[in-house]
Image: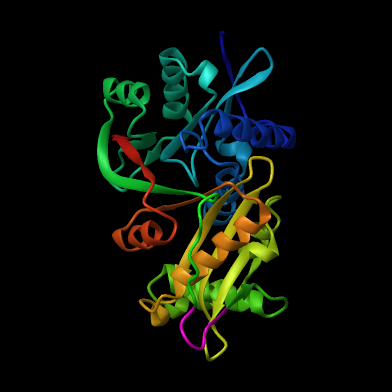
Amino acid sequence: METTYRPYQSEDDYWRMRAFLREVFVLNGFRERSWHVARLEYARWHTCLNCHNLTLDQVAHLWEADGELAAIAMPDGGPGEAHFMIHPAYDTRDLQEDMLAVVEDKLVATNKAGRRELVVWAMEDDERRTEVLADHGYTCKGWVETQHRRDLSLPIPEVAPPVGYTLRALGDGLELLERCYASGLGFHKGDIKIAVENRDDPTWYRNIQTAPLYRRDLDLVAIAPDGSIASFCTIWFDDVTRSAYFEPVATVPAHQRRGVSRALLTEGLHRLQRMGCRWAFVAGFEHGPNRLYETTVGPEYGHYRAWEKT
């Protein structure tokens, strides 16, 4: 069936995109050949809005067939990259080439050397997309997102936190500021300046908390013996597909290599299992996090690769 392109237009499109991703995720057998709905939420409320000050009408692009969504293309943040989400019934070479033409027009970024560049992501087993990208001059680069998944019908071991640490959901009041501070330390190698900036203006975290899937009882923290936040992970549970996504996950450098993250992730898996969740997902780019996810979430994974053209 012929598809037609149009840019994102209204809040109604956001809710259509959420429903579309849920349908496609199930059709793809709960594998990330298309985004989990949580990735759309985190992209909208954090990587696009907080990190790049962009709204969906500036970066999201839609294709329709007979009035229904057939595909979505957008970055996980700002221009310079694109992710394709395609309904399997419409996944043709013609559609992918049309999508590529649109993102090359709308989402290309200019690098420091003044040259235009674009990264398009593809699962390594997606033969059609990798063939289209190669034919259009894209090269597979070394940047790989390893996507870990766990079947929650299987038993989950008990993992106790280190002595003196406690695991619980994020508290109220001033603890939100401490969570912002810990994020700065965890993701920026203990950089105090960034941590203080994060804490001074928590608007960015309140933006995340407005996402429809956000739940305080799944925004987990590990509390150190001194009362500070040592580690954290936010879990996005979609009760429609009964699947969940961990994002973000980090540990403050002073508390790393003590088993804190492993205990916290395992606590999250137990909570999800009690809720009736069927599948859990988490993704990593570096050896350390991927080793943690492999030993905690499980050895089942796929590779999502960056293809670049300059």
Looking at the picture, the colour scheme in use is rainbow
Which residue is drawn at the image coordinates 55% and 24% (left, top)? Answer: 87
Q: From the viewer's perspective, is 111 left or right of 209?
A: left
Q: Residue 176 location, x and y as percent?
A: 65, 74
* Closer to the camera in the image, 296 or 58: 296
Q: Residue furthest top?
A: 1
Vertical comparison of 118 with 209: above or below? above
Which residue is drawn at the image coordinates 36% and 48% (left, top)? Answer: 146
* Closer to the camera in the image, 103 or 92: 92
Q: Is residue 67 magenta?
A: no
| Magenta span: chief secondary structure | loop
Which residue is drawn at the image coordinates 41% and 28% (left, top)? Answer: 104
Q: Residue furthest front?
A: 155
Q: Residue 27 location, x and y as percent?
A: 55, 28
Can residue 251 be seen from the camera position used here? no
Q: Residue 98 location, x and y as percent?
A: 46, 18
* Closer to the camera in the image, 54 or 228: 228
Can residue 176 be seen from the camera position used here? yes
Q: From the viewer's perspective, is 199 left or right of 99?
A: right
Q: Is residue 164 magenta?
A: yes
Part of the protein shown in magenta: 161-166
Vertical comparison of 35 with 277: above or below? above
Residue 204 placement: quadrant: bottom right
Vertical comparison of 45 with 157: above or below? above
Query: For the N terminus, which image quadrant?
Result: top right
Which residue is drawn at the image coordinates 62% and 44% (left, top)? Answer: 55
Q: Residue 97 location, x and y as percent?
A: 41, 18
